[in-house]
Amino acid sequence: MTFQSPKGTFDWLPPRSERALRVREAMAEPARRAGYGYIETPTFEDTALFARGVGESTDIVSKEMYTFQDKGGRSITLRPEGTAPVVRAVLQHGLHNGRLPVKLWYSGNNFRYERAQRGRYRHFSQVGIEALGAEDPVLDAEVISLGVQGYAALGLGGITLLLNTLGCKECRPAYRAALQGFLRGLDLDEATRQRIEINPLRVLDDSRPEVQARLTGVPLVTDHLCQACKAYHEDVRSLLTASGVAYTDDPRLVRGLDYYTRTTFEFVHGGLGSQSAVGGGGRYDGLSEMIGGPPLPSVGWAIGVDRTVLAMEAEGLFGEDPATGTPVQVYGVPLGEEARRRMFLLLAEIRAAGFVADMAFGGKGLKGAMKGADRSGASVALILGERDLAAQAVQMKDLTTAEQTEVPLAQVVEALKGKIQ
Ligand code: AMP
């Protein structure tokens, strides 16, 4: 019997896996340059952290968590998102008692029991940044621009930034009530009617056309903001404009996690069908208090690595050929036992000099080993037979021209330097 990866998961295999690495590196780089430090939290946490932090009424907590009891009887959940764990870690280690904002970035796997489809998996990875402990529109603008810069570095042209604000604890309750009043008057199915009572903002996010059709004239949060939220949002918008970041105001934008306040945004891409969000984030001023900490106004985002790769593929950014990662440059072809030992040492020397080198393993004959050399994509093969060993030399074959020269073993690295730029 052979095993398959579990439903809703897939394997990143070379050479395509290089694309995921590239996305992680490109998205993290602008944040590192803005003073964000790397944080790694455990893959699992106390279930209560997510129940309280993300919110009992969200789809994530109510339907999608991988929750189990460990052997010590604790309720454990595989992390469905990265923000609540980061806030937990900041509070636990008192990072918020130092210089604020605390700036952190992370890269890791998440788990959600979702209906699996292209772009939506049960196991997926995100890169995220969080800036904790400052309430300043400049910080929101910084966070958003760092995402924009990451996507730009990847060459992605088809990304739209959707921007909204969700108000604060002063103005949100009145908006929520107005929204509920409107929604209760609509002809909606039972599940949606329940949602109106527990999480009415999420109804705005319902992707079903029949629901969207009924939302004409729905009260918008932007018409219910308090003065402070209005001014804050205007500042964020004008800072983005001043820095050349294009955005689309989307007063219906809400996100699937309860902790967002004020600035909320999503990065969407047109080439992905229904799973168009490649990243998203916002301000979460109340999250720290929700999980037992002091007030810690914060802002951040998470981008989906898997979907960002799909978006890049949709734009043809990797070209026709699969990404090659680190292509092999030099390939060793040892003939005989002693030659294998010597080739092993020679490759170490070649690699230390900065070349990417591989060799034929398993005692292949000349023909099989040369086939391996061709398949590796190397431009140079080093053939080491018994006679060469005796002469302390190697046959250096240029695989593009088929030209072959004898090079003393001690001069192989020098000769490669002349041949491979
Ligand atoms: P969220 O944590 O839901 O705000 O998601 C942030 C980003 O993570 C989204 O924009 C997606 O790119 C990605 N993402 C969320 N859920 C999934 C999933 N089930 N499969 C793949 N990517 C996801």
Image: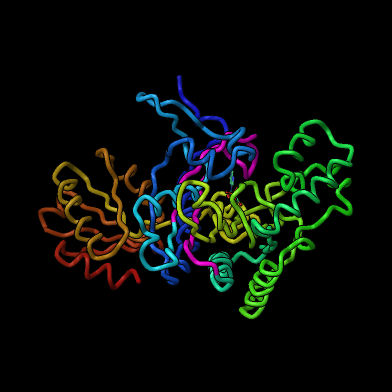
Which of the two residues, 364 or 242, is positioned nearer the viewer here?
242
Question: Would residue 335 be visible to someone looking at this image?
Answer: yes
Which quadrant is home to the N terminus? top left
Which of the two residues, 317 or 336, is positioned nearer the viewer here?
317
Question: Would residue 16 be visible to someone looking at this image?
Answer: no
- Residue sitting farthest toward the bottom: 242
Q: Is residue 131 magenta?
A: yes
Q: Is residue 348 above or below residue 157?
A: above
Q: Is residue 141 magenta?
A: no
Instruction: Find residue 141 and report its horizontal and vertical position in percent.
Output: 58, 71
- Residue sitting farthest toward the left: 390
Which of the two residues, 165 or 344, is positioned nearer the viewer here?
165
Instruction: Find residue 33 and report its horizontal and vertical position in percent.
Output: 43, 71
Which quadrant is home to the C terminus? bottom left
Which of the two residues, 151 or 396, is positioned nearer the viewer here?
151
Instruction: Find residue 167 and report its horizontal and vertical position in percent.
Output: 68, 60
Q: Is residue 416 left or right of residue 142?
A: left
Q: Quadrant of residue 188?
A: top right
Figure label count: 0
Q: Is residue 401 above or below residue 323?
A: below
Q: Is residue 137 above or below residue 365?
A: below
Q: Quadrant of residue 250?
A: bottom right
Question: At 40% from the left edge and 28% from the top edge, which residue is drawn?
Answer: 74
Q: How is the image coloured?
A: rainbow
- Residue sitting farthest toward the top: 1
- The residue segment tinted magenta is 106-135
Question: At 34% from the left edge and 62% from the top edge, which residue is drawn?
Answer: 398
Question: At 13% from the left edge and 53% from the top edge, which residue is drawn?
Answer: 389
Question: At 47% from the left edge and 57% from the top edge, which residue is drawn?
Answer: 24
